[in-house]
Image (cartoon, rainbow, N blue to C red):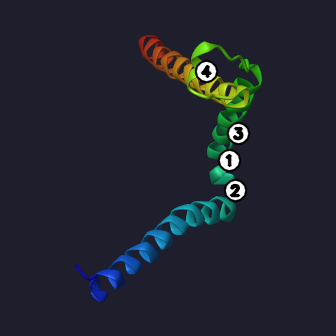
């Protein structure tokens, strides 16, 4: 079966549109953030806290290997990255639960 030139053109056009959408989705929030830093301050603080949690979780996680890691060909660096991701997930989940509980208890006292 021969490829139709219209299908190829359509695929290339779809690739270009996906690239434009991805670049726009990344560029426009950055432009808006630096356009008005006073309004973006809380968002930037939240982003900095998230990066801090990820960094701390990565630094704290051990780079251990065992039989399972050797069987699956997972290096100590990859083990440390996986452990850091899991630990960061646990920390963020605990933070969400604590903030929900705080919001509910604070409503009782208002």
User: In terms of sequence position, does the residue under pointer 3 or pointer 4 come before the other?
Assistant: 3
Cα distance between the residues tagged 1 and 2? 6 Å
Nearer the viewer's eye, disc 2 or disc 3?
3
At 66% from the left and 25% from the top, the residue drawn is: 79
| Mark-to-mark CA distance, 3 and 1 | 10 Å
Question: In the drawing, what numbered circle is on residue 24?
Answer: none
Residue under label 2: 37
Q: Is residue 110 left or right of residue 51?
A: left
Residue 71 in sight in this render? yes
Gap in Å between the C-alphas at discs 3 and 4?
Answer: 32 Å
Q: Residue at x 69, y 24 (%)?
A: 57
Q: Position of residue 5 (x, y in %)?
A: 31, 88
| Residue denoted by label 1 | 41
Q: Residue at x 51, y 23 (%)?
A: 96
Of all residues shown, which one is farthest toward the bottom? 5
Q: Nearer the viewer, residue 98 or 38?
A: 98
Looking at the picture, does residue 75 appear above or below residue 12?
above
Q: Do the CB atoms of the residues marked 4 and 2 lie less than 8 Å apart? A: no
**Residue reaching furthest front?**
1
Which residue of the protein is positioned furthest toward the right in this rendering? 59
The secondary element bearing badge 2 is classed as helix
């Amino acid at each position: 079966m021969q490829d139709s030139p219209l299908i190829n053109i359509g695929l290339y056009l779809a690739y270009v549109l996906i690239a434009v959408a991805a670049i726009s989705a990344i560029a426009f929030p950055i432009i808006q953030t630096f356009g008005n830093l006073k309004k973006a301050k809380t968002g930037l603080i939240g982003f900095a806290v998230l990066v801090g949690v990820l960094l701390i979780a990565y630094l704290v996680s051990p780079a251990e290997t065992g039989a399972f890691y050797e069987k699956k060909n997972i290096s100590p660096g990859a083990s440390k990255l996986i452990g850091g991701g899991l630990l960061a997930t646990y920390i963020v989940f605990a933070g969400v639960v604590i903030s929900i509980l705080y919001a509910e208890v604070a409503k009782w006292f208002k």
